[in-house]
Amino acid sequence: MHIDVDILLAYGATPKEWHKGELIFSQGNEARYFHQIDHGMVKMTSLTNDAKEFIQGVFNNGNSFGEPALMLSKPYPASAYAVSDSIIYRLSKEKFLLLLEDYPSLFKKLFHIFCERLYCKTLTANILVNNSPEEKLIGFFDKIKSECKLNESGFIPYTRQQLADYTGLRVETVIRTLSKLADKKIVVIQDHKVFYK
């Protein structure tokens, strides 16, 4: 969700600088702030039982993150890290709730975002419960395609490691599976880049 910066500042938001790799909040921490990225990139991750990182979401300029835990007064279900040097506006929960009362249209916007994220989480769950690595990767590609994260050429904007982190596969498995998908003409690999139509 994007809220006009002037409105955030009027309600007491403060900008905070985070350096690449820095932890913004930890899984299990109490949610106390609304976070909105001014510029930079943030990823939310959780750890599997075998200590493997699983990416829950990636957020960019103007995006907010972590609102479900904040609204439910629950601990964060994932940790958030700055992927690049970032400036993030933070607004206390109390002031954020006042802001929502004063701007009912933002409540509707927040509801829409929650629905969108729930839909995406369902797609992600479907990817994870599929048995074969091929099904997992194709499911993930279909998911990001539906989210309009592919350009016209179908370029997959993720590294092999990120694909592994999103699908719960090992990097080696991702590399082997991409080769199989290329042999079947489901993806095209060109100059180490993956394309999916």
Image: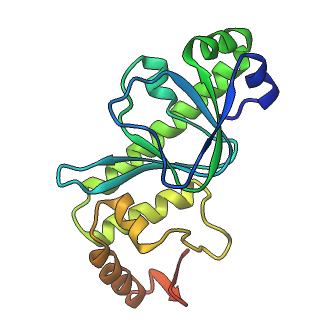
Screen quadrant of the C terminus: bottom right
Residue 167 vertical placement versus 134 (above, below): above
Q: Is residue 89 left or right of residue 70?
A: right
- The quarter holding residue 63 reads top right
Q: Could you say where residue 41 lies in the image, as x and y percent from the top left?
A: 59, 52
Q: Is residue 185 left or right of residue 97?
A: left
Q: Nearer the viewer, residue 29 or 59?
A: 29
Q: Which residue does the image show at 34% across and 53% down from the upper left? A: 54
Q: Is residue 125 left or right of residue 65?
A: left
Q: Which residue does the image show at 49% across and 19% down from the upper left? A: 71
Screen quadrant of the N terminus: top right
Q: Nearer the viewer, residue 40 or 188?
A: 40
Residue 115 vertical placement versus 148 (above, below): above
Residue 114 vertical placement versus 46 (above, below): above
Q: Could you say where residue 27 lies in the image, as x and y percent from the top left?
A: 35, 36
Image label count: 0
- The quarter holding residue 162 reads bottom left
Q: Could you say where residue 89 lies in the image, as x and y percent from the top left?
A: 66, 33
How was the colour assigned to the protein in this rendering? rainbow
Q: Which residue does the image show at 47% across and 27% down from the upper left? A: 68
- The quarter holding residue 113 reads top right
Q: Is residue 49 left or right of residue 28?
A: left
The residue most toward the right is 6
Q: Could you say where residue 52 lies in the image, as x and y percent from the top left?
A: 26, 57
